[in-house]
Image (cartoon, rainbow, N blue to C red):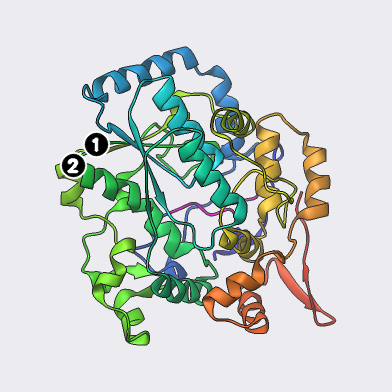
């Protein structure tokens, strides 16, 4: 990390800091060696995510919706065959996307699910409701659990990102399904610009270069290692075991003429309103308990490993689940900055005790082993150890 990145800056409007990294094509570089782009700040001390949300107030949403109608009219099948893909697990966002595309824009979406690592009870109920109440065909893919366990273990140990192999797999899954069905239109949810985005990601299109890698299998990176290193370490692994995690070749995308669009670029996107819509139209239900590390019950509740993922983010970047949640709520005008600070003081950084042991068991680590690994990733500009206890050097608000 560069010295300037060790100075933590918090946005004057929301609570997000300059430590927040953005996604990259992690199959092309070992994450330990790769400097990711981070949230940008202007001289006014306001982050790019807040500026993006503010700019949305000036958008002509009626015009954007007309543009969406044009796209749907061009791509809609005349014989009822699938004409677009919506990827998800039955969360509020995928429920909204599939429902509004089918019942308002008269599309024929195929919903596809890359199975969560460790399904929660509420996640299973919501995925069932998505299909049965929302009314959709669905293809669900579950990767080899033995392989996923090994990759998740390595990702946790090498880069403290236990969900990384899953997220690599899910990124390309919709495109692979589109290729299988001969469909050239895929919809995702809110655009990355709503979170500040990396440079050049402010328009309607998902960057297809994030889905491709023309390197040989052995040279692809996953879980902080090259595939050849992983195969050497786990002698039961074969080339075919990595297929779910492999990116597409550039030629595949050119032949398919694929377009991946953010529905939130065309329709005004408010997570709270999305939740209300999905509850009414597709039977989305809340978790019975608040999420460890935050106060909400309706976002990212389908996978036990996500709870550990958010905690790991807090350790590495000082940005946990609560700071992410309140920053979004502040930008959308649902809570004040002061209320966000109070919520962070109460919930930010909570250990994910509800599902932690399930996650550690899946990876083959004892509770003590897992926590020792976590402690190795505490950066010295964020953490210090006093009287044998880890403390944040400062909470930046």
Q: Quadrant of residue 393?
A: bottom right
Q: Main secondary structure of the magenta part?
A: loop
Of residues 103 and 301, the one nearer the viewer is 103
Q: Position of residue 317 (x, y in %)?
A: 62, 61
Percent position of residue 175, x then y: 29, 46
Looking at this view, is 138 or 250 the one in front? 138
**Label 1, on which residue?**
184
Would residue 22 be counted in the magenta stretch?
yes
Q: Is residue 106 left or right of residue 301?
A: left
Say if 163 sits above or below 12 in the image: below
- Left-right relation of 28 to 254: right
Give whichever of 36, 376 is nearer the camera. Answer: 376
Q: Is residue 3 above or below residue 262?
A: below
Q: Position of residue 313 (x, y in %)?
A: 61, 61
Question: Which mark identifies residue 256?
Answer: 2
The segment highlighted magenta reads: 17-23
Image quadrant holding the N terminus, namely: bottom right
Of residues 2 and 241, the one drawn nearer to the viewer in this rendering: 241
Could you tell me how far apart the alpha carbons at marks 2 and 1 are, in whole angstroms?
Answer: 6 Å
Q: Does residue 243 appear to the left or right of 57 in the view shown? A: left
SS for callout 2: helix
Q: Are marks 2 and 1 in contact (CB under 8 Å)?
A: yes
Q: Which class describes the residues within 10 Å of circle 1: few (<14), some (14-19), or many (20+)?
A: some
| Location of residue 374 (image quadrant) | bottom right
Q: Residue at 39% x, 14% y: name it.
A: 66
Mark 2, residues whose alpha carbon is within 10 Å: few (<14), some, or many (≥20)? some
Circle 1: element type? loop
Residue visible at 38% across and 75% down in the picture: 225
Q: Taking 219 as reference, is 163 above or below it?
A: above
Q: Magenta span has 382?
A: no
């Amino acid at each position: 990390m560069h010295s300037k990145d060790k100075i933590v800056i918090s946005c004057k409007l929301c609570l997000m800091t300059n430590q927040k990294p953005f996604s990259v094509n992690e199959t092309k570089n070992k994450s330990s060696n790769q400097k990711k782009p981070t949230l940008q700040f202007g001289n006014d001390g306001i982050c790019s995510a807040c500026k993006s949300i503010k700019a949305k107030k000036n958008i002509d949403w009626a015009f954007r919706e007309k543009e969406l109608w044009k796209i749907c009219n061009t791509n809609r099948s005349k014989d009822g065959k699938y004409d677009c893909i919506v990827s998800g697990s039955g969360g509020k966002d995928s429920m909204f996307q599939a429902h509004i595309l089918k019942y308002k824009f008269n599309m024929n979406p195929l919903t596809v699910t890359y199975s969560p690592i460790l399904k929660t009870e509420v996640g299973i109920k919501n995925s069932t409701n998505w299909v049965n109440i929302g009314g959709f065909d669905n293809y669900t893919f579950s990767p080899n659990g033995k392989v996923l366990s090994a990759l998740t273990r390595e990702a946790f140990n090498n880069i403290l990102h236990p969900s990384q192999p899953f997220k690599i797999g899910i990124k390309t899954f919709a495109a692979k399904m589109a290729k299988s069905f001969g469909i050239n239109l895929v919809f995702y949810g809110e655009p990355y610009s709503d979170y500040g985005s990396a440079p050049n990601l402010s328009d309607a299109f998902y960057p297809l270069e994030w889905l491709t890698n023309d390197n040989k299998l052995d040279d692809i990176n996953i879980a902080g290692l090259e595939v050849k290193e992983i195969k050497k370490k786990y002698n039961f692994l074969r080339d075919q075991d990595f297929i779910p995690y492999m990116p597409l070749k550039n030629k595949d995308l050119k032949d398919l003429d694929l377009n991946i669009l953010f529905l939130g670029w065309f329709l005004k996107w408010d997570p709270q309103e999305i939740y209300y819509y999905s509850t009414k139209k597709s039977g989305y239900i809340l978790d019975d308990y608040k999420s460890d590390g935050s106060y909400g019950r309706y976002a990212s509740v389908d996978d036990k490993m996500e709870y550990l993922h958010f905690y790991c983010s807090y350790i590495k970047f000082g940005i946990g689940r609560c700071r992410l949640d309140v920053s979004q709520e502040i930008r959308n005008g649902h809570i004040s900055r002061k209320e966000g600070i109070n919520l962070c003081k109460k919930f930010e950084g909570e250990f994910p005790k509800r599902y932690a042991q399930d996650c550690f068991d899946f990876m083959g680590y004892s509770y003590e082993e897992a926590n020792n690994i976590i402690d190795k990733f505490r950066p010295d500009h964020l953490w210090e150890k006093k009287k044998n206890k880890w403390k944040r050097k400062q909470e930046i608000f």
